[in-house]
Image: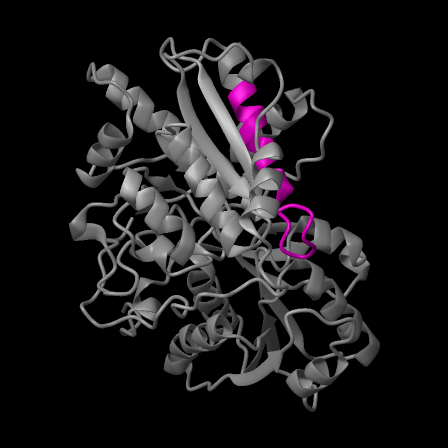
Amino acid sequence: MTSRRGSSQAMHPIAGRRRRRPIAAVATAAAVLPTLFSASACGGPADAATGSGDLTVMTWAPAGTGAADRPGMTSLAEAIGRDINVKGGLHGRRLRVITCNEHNTSDGAKACAQQAVDAKAVAVLGSYSQYGDDFMPVLERAGIPLIGGYGLSQPEFGSPLSYPVGGGMPALIAGSGRQLVEAGCKSVAVIRPDTPSGDNLLGALGNALKPAGIKPLDVKAPEKSNDYSPEVRKAIGGDQPGNCVTSALGAEPTGNLLDAFRRTGAKNTRIASVIGSVQQSVVDSTGGDNGPLAGAFVTGWYPPESAKIWDGLRAVIRADTAGRTIDAADPGVQTTWVAFEVFRQVSDRLAAAGRQVTSKTITALLDGGEQIDVGLTPPLNWATTNMLPSTESPRLVNTWVTYQVVKGGQLTLQRPGFVDVRWVLTGGKPPA
């Protein structure tokens, strides 16, 4: 494998340091917090009879909010906890997994982080929130590491206590650009959210296309819409051979976007997207090989769900007795699995060294440059020498992506292994 160290050039910022407020007026703390805490406690046999010797970890994600919902992440976390405890725990210690509904609000994110502090969690694993500016300071004051956040906010790529396992949206959109260049696209349009984070994605895509002499056509779109026909018509243009369109809107809006593509009847335009906007459930719901995603290019963080390397995840989902639906193809679910696998490996190494598993020992091991290889990403290493040369996003250490394609109605690898887009994210030159 080639070296993962990048150039010293500055990177396009990951996401604006925005501090979004809830759409509705913020309810009083007395109204919000009880809902958060009552919805957050874990149930089931794996979490009963906890004691002072337990290891506590937390996972949070929004539920009951609409398009932002990721309930599979917290459901999987609980299922993993039960599976570990049925098999004897971690080195004789019971794993207590607590979960929290983040409600897709800043107050919800802070409340979940505070619950992790109050529960004396040794780590937050997985988790999905756009409010890193709100939750990360709470974790930092308590010294609790975040392992494998989804990567929606800048603090997840900047905080010294964050250990992201993927490259977030910028790595995906950069990878999508390179995938389209390699596919022979002559022109590329991007349909992306009309938001500050969407603005930053445009920069990453532009860097990816620049060596091929392609300037992306920027098509701004609302984050939610029942009809994306105007945006699709603009992106397709004259529907000429070599025309390609990529998008990054999220799974639910992408379904509506694909309806608009189908209605245009375009014959020559190739469709591409990124994982999270397109996943196997979206391929299935839009007609599989008979739908608009037939032959579509998709850039992901991990191998496709059909890969044998996800057998462990599928086994835990099958063994879960809670009766909830957990989609093994969902990138939030997959990121949570990777985060727990990193935590499990760290725990094994600490135990082998005769050390207790605490927030401090976890961060010390990860900061010490130990390489963590769970098989689902290239080896992860958060040592200073491996960080991205960026003041905004130094924690973005995994700049590798996978190229996938919809074939036979299934997301499959277009080419084996991972592709490094570090040079794109740093504004450098492509490797020779």
Question: Please, is residue 109 above or below residue 171 in the view?
Answer: above
Residue 124 located within the stretch drawn in magenta: no
Residue at 56% x, 47% y: name it: 331
Q: Is residue 233 left or right of residue 145?
A: right
Q: Nearer the viewer, residue 167 or 419?
A: 167
Q: Is residue 46 visible?
A: yes
Q: Position of residue 237 (x, y in %)?
A: 68, 89
Residue at 52% x, 64% y: name it: 21
Q: Quadrant of residue 54?
A: top left
Q: Is residue 269 left or right of residue 149?
A: right
Q: Quadrant of residue 345?
A: top left
Q: Is residue 240 visible?
A: no
Q: Is residue 297 left or right of residue 354?
A: right
Residue at 57% x, 52% y: name it: 28
Residue at 23% x, 28% y: name it: 361
Q: Which residues are magenta?
A: 62-82
Question: Please, is residue 370 above or below residue 88 in the view?
Answer: below
Residue farthest bottom in this picture: 238
